[in-house]
Image (cartoon, helix red, strand yellow):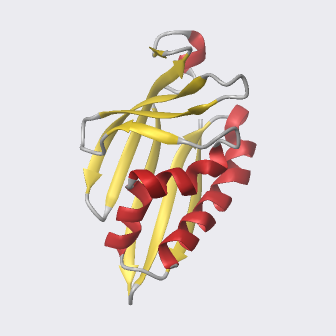
Amino acid sequence: MEKLHFSIAIKAPKQKVWDVMLADATYREWTDVFNPEGGSYYEGNWNEGSKMLFLGPGSDGKIGGMVSRIAVNRPYEYISIEHMGEFINGHEDTTSERAKVWTEMYENYTFTEHDGVTTLKVDLDSNDMFKEMFAAMWPKALAKLKQIVEK
């Protein structure tokens, strides 16, 4: 497993960046980069300890995605998502060999603000199978988030 790091400076207070990043409607906008088949969305809430499903349609038209848990939530400062498996064919899979690829992988977001500019840092675990894909998609997703927040 390898840690990937991304960051972006956004001209807005960290509370606004946080709110736009996590709100349902705007989450769907900036994360559509990850799912060109028809957009990404989540089911659940961002409360610490809560289960979250990160979902979207696949190329076969079926809904798929990640089964995760909000490991840490310090509003406007830090949020950590623990991935626990996959959502496949209408059910949660946290035990198969395929699902275990995701277990104990984290996505961490850190928000720091200086003079009205928020730096959003993203640190996430990856394996060789996803490293190249994430390296291509994350900068695009963060640029889109910046555009939404700053408009």
Q: Is residue 44 left or right of residue 105?
A: left
Q: Which residue of the protein is positioned furthest toward the top in this rendering?
A: 96
Residue 144 position, x and y percent, is 60, 65
Q: Is residue 102 above or below residue 131?
A: above
| Residue located 35% across and 52% down the image | 79
| Residue located 33% across and 58% down the image | 78
- Say which quarter of the image contains residue 68: top left
Residue 37 position, x and y percent, is 70, 38
- Say which quarter of the image contains residue 71: top left
Residue 8 position, x and y percent, is 56, 70
Q: Is residue 43 above or below residue 121?
A: above
- Say which quarter of the image contains residue 57: top right
Q: Is residue 69 left or right of residue 102?
A: left
Q: Is residue 116 left or right of residue 33?
A: left
Q: Is residue 55 above or below residue 30?
A: above
| Residue located 73% across and 28% down the image | 59
Q: Which residue of the protein is positioned furthest toward the bottom in this rendering?
A: 115
| Residue located 47% across and 45% down the image | 107
Q: Quadrant of the N terminus?
A: top right
Pick whichever, 27 or 137, lies toward us.
27
Residue 95 position, x and y percent, is 47, 10
Q: Is residue 63 above or below residue 75?
A: above
Pick whichever, 128 or 71, lies toward us.
71
Q: Is residue 106 left or right of residue 48?
A: right
Question: How many circles with numbers are drawn on the protein?
Answer: 0
